[in-house]
Image: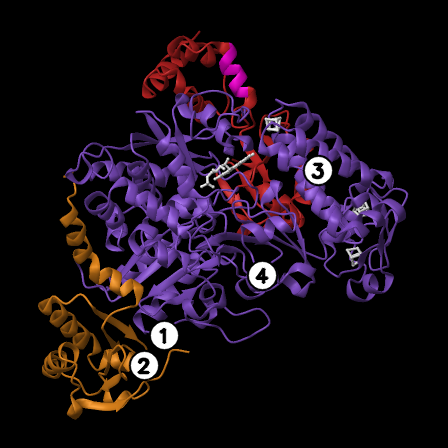
Amino acid sequence: MSSETQNKAKEISEKWDNNPENIIEMMHDIQDEYKYLPREVIESLSNESNVPVSKILNIATFYNAFSLKPKGKHKICVCMGTPCHTLGAARVAEALERELKIKMGETTPDLKYSLEETRCLSACGLAPVVVIGEDLYGPATVPNIPKLLKKYEKK
Amino acid sequence: MKPYTIQLMICAGTGCVSNQSFEIKEVLEKEIKKHNLQNEAMVVTTGCNGFCGAGPIMVVQPDGIFYQYLKVTDIPYLVEEHLVKGRPVKKFMYVPPKEEIPIPRMNKIPFFSGQTLVALRNRGMIDPEFIEDYIARGGYRALAKVLTTMSPDEVLKEIKKSGLRGRGGGGFPTGVKWETCKKIPGDRKFVICNADEGDPGAFMDRSIIEGDPHSVIEGMIIGAYAIENVREGYIYVRMEYPLAIKRFNIAVQQAKDNGLLGDNIFDTNFCFDIKVRRGAGAFVCGESTALMASIMGNPGEPRAKYIHTVEKGLYDCPTCLNNVETWANIPQIVLKGADWFTGIGTGDVTHDPWGGSKGTKVFSLAGKVNNTGLVEVPMGITLREIVFNVGGGIRDGKRFKAVQTGGPSGGFIPESLVDLPVDYDELTKVGSMMGSGGMVVLDENNCMVDMAKFFLRFTQDESCGKCVPCREGTKRMYDILYRITKGEGKEEDLDLLEELSNMIVESSLCALGGSAPNPVLTSLKYFREEYLTHVRDKKCPAKVCRELLTFSIDPEKCLENGHGCGVCEKNCPDGAIYGEKKNVHFIDSMKCGKCGVCFDVCKFGAITVE
Amino acid sequence: MAKLKIEDLEKITEEFKRKMTLREGAGRVKITVHLGTCGIAAGARKIMNSFMEEIEKSKATDIIMTTSGCAGLCSREPMATVEVIGNAPIKYVDLTIDKVKIIFDKHVMKGAFVQEYALSVGSEKIQ
Ligand SMILES: Cc1cc2nc3c(=O)[nH]c(=O)nc-3n(C[C@H](O)[C@H](O)[C@H](O)COP(=O)(O)O)c2cc1C
Ligand code: SF4
Ligand code: SF4
Ligand code: SF4
């Protein structure tokens, strides 16, 4: 176990008073830091916070916020809110699948992009909405998808 | 403080921020400096202005000039014209659909003039990150009034009298809930603000938090005082709202720094504090018992509610959970009195707290409507007024088909019921529900079977899996709907859907399962014909269910308008399109995978769908 | 930071009142200085500044001061319109700093308009 991950886990656990009840907040901080929950950080966190690894894994699988697998460098999320759906989000999603040659929930082999559906982002005025990393785009249209992806090609 | 003559109120809600409102602010300030106007013009970032579909939005006060769709590159011109030369710029103003003359003033635009602001009273008026702005608009006066002139019982009586009902879904009378919680013995009690807003297509709570977080905090402090023995409060915000989380954290910190949270508030012996907790992306955590499990660091599984959370909630203590908008109404009721509040809305709540719907409701209007955004209207207003007056009617001149209210727990309301007054009871009567206030407008191009399938997929994804009827029942219903949209449905399926629905409603543990069939039941009730067309004729009249469509090319349009441009051929992933450049193109229906790409890319409307 | 007392709420409100009145577009009196190109050339900025000084001196918080475009009467600039809410707006022309003081004193503060400097009663709307 590297000391770097151990220190991170310790720091985060302390931020939340080492209180097992705050485990979800701690996991959020780890997810924000690594973009997923690396196994060894989970183990360190378990030591620091006194929450069993099994419970952390249970929480991680229950909530959509957490991921146990590494994600692509650019996480692409298609909003699946009702207004986005009525305005063609499913078509946009398919277009992304075609462009990236992966299915929803997958990551490209070069770890560059992951494609996911997300729960409503409540930016319904811009529906249909696509989020790449921290950038929100809308209204996203099928013919625009290749252009949108181009912006990230070199990043 | 400087005697400014002009204030530029720029919207910094989620929608506008993603369209660069912060960059616009920077350029504005730079341009103002350049023209040496920094002592006259002040730029203020506000919360969500509500007119989200037209962002980024800026309102210039005191004249209330409304600008929309601003771009960073427009700003130098705008500053020069409006601020230096004093000429408001028409081309950035709002023009009503199908008209040509812009409406310069915000309060003359029907979207705004049709609204009554209570919960959103500060929207666009304050910078949500400055507690002073909130105070200068009358903030924390209700708290002062309560702590110095009213006993907890008097506060409770006032809230009960107001007839306020929960804005988070069920419409439970808030005063009754507080009273129950108050009566249960216990010296450690909690209040919680439910800001999980899981209904897809709802963004009322997000906007209230982003625009006016202190109103929610003030409401919670007053609630804690009225219920008594409450020293701790939680705000549970969904993690998809980073801006709202940030604003809540800032507001709570400011309230603490100013002694409005903490010990001996306003030098009385009343003490109360609030913690902010992030949700983790599970719809079911909006449900009271699941939400509390989540705050305590557990998976958010509901428990059977033989014992209500007002009795045994967080840490098994009596807990009062209310929605964001419910809390935001409290200070106004305290300040203006219950009688003022009951003057707005429907029914009579003097003897029966369920006897009417009082006050206003905030709806998030989205979908196929011209003015997407947040609207606050008096209870009892008709759907027609919301969709056609405030909402400006249907986009692109299409035909109005239905409104979906209440999200995955609600239902569809067809065009024939468009004059329905909107309140808790009327919506329930027609099979839908108020829910938290999401209102998605559908037009002739939306397929009701597809919409029902969409919601079923949502509930099935979000079912926590604890009980079989919800977990398995919704899956079976989804499978049936999926089959129907693929053209493999049978007529008996419709009865089967109804049967399954009733079974799930009756035997689910929590309200997620209990209300999951509503979208199916209401669409079957009002749009049975559309289901039958799918099942019998294997056609989708709205042209949504892809497997039931045939794509072809209109040779005349292809040749005359498009000169056989060949774009469709290049883009077809299945190589199903043939044709010589500059000549008519054809689709080979055997090869066509029905992806719809050709339809999207043809700029000449030559692709026809049947 | 100091803990707020109830009296402080009013103090903060007073302090920010002018800002809020302007924002709400709701004051007792509204003064509009016409800042068209010719207005500026004729010294409208000076007129605006002296109105602002007067507001400062009076400590009033219910006066909104704003600017608008050319009023279309270039030969009579600088001009300003004073509107006591509820009454017809009065347009003043050929303004000087001395005139501003008198207008502020009599019309803005006391509500009696100054006939000899006035051009007309009524005003055009922004459209
Ligand atoms: C599955 C499910 C999801 C819910 N989601 C929310 C929500 O996102 N926000 C909310 O305020 N209430 C939600 N509720 C309703 C809450 O359980 C609760 O009734 C409400 O927060 C009480 O506050 P109110 O009385 O002020 O409406 C949900 C209920 C269920 C069953
Ligand atoms: S009804 Fe569904 S969401 Fe509710 S407890 Fe049962 S399985 Fe979980
Ligand atoms: S894109 Fe349209 S116009 Fe061009 S070849 Fe295809 S059908 Fe014809
Ligand atoms: S629908 Fe898709 S597969 Fe069929 S012709 Fe058009 S582009 Fe090709």
Work out whether residue C103 can be spotted: yes
Q: Quadrant of residue C40?
A: bottom left
Q: Nearer the viewer, mark 4 or mark 3?
A: 4
Q: Which residue is mark 1?
A: B87
Q: Is residue B460 above or below residue B528?
A: above
Q: Which residues are magenta?
A: A54-60
Q: Colour of chain C?
A: orange
The alpha-carbon separation of the residues under discs 1 and 3 comes to 49 Å
Q: Which residue is mark 2?
A: C70
Ligand 2 shows up in which quadrant of the image? Answer: top right
Q: Nearer the viewer, residue B417 or C13?
A: B417
Q: Which residue is mark 4?
A: B387
The alpha-carbon separation of the residues under discs 4 and 3 comes to 36 Å
Q: Are marks 4 and 3 on the same chain?
A: no
Determine the residue positioned at 78% across, 57% down: B565
Q: Which residue is mark 3?
A: A98
Main secondary structure along the magenta-highlighted residues: helix
Q: Nearer the viewer, residue C106 or B189?
A: B189
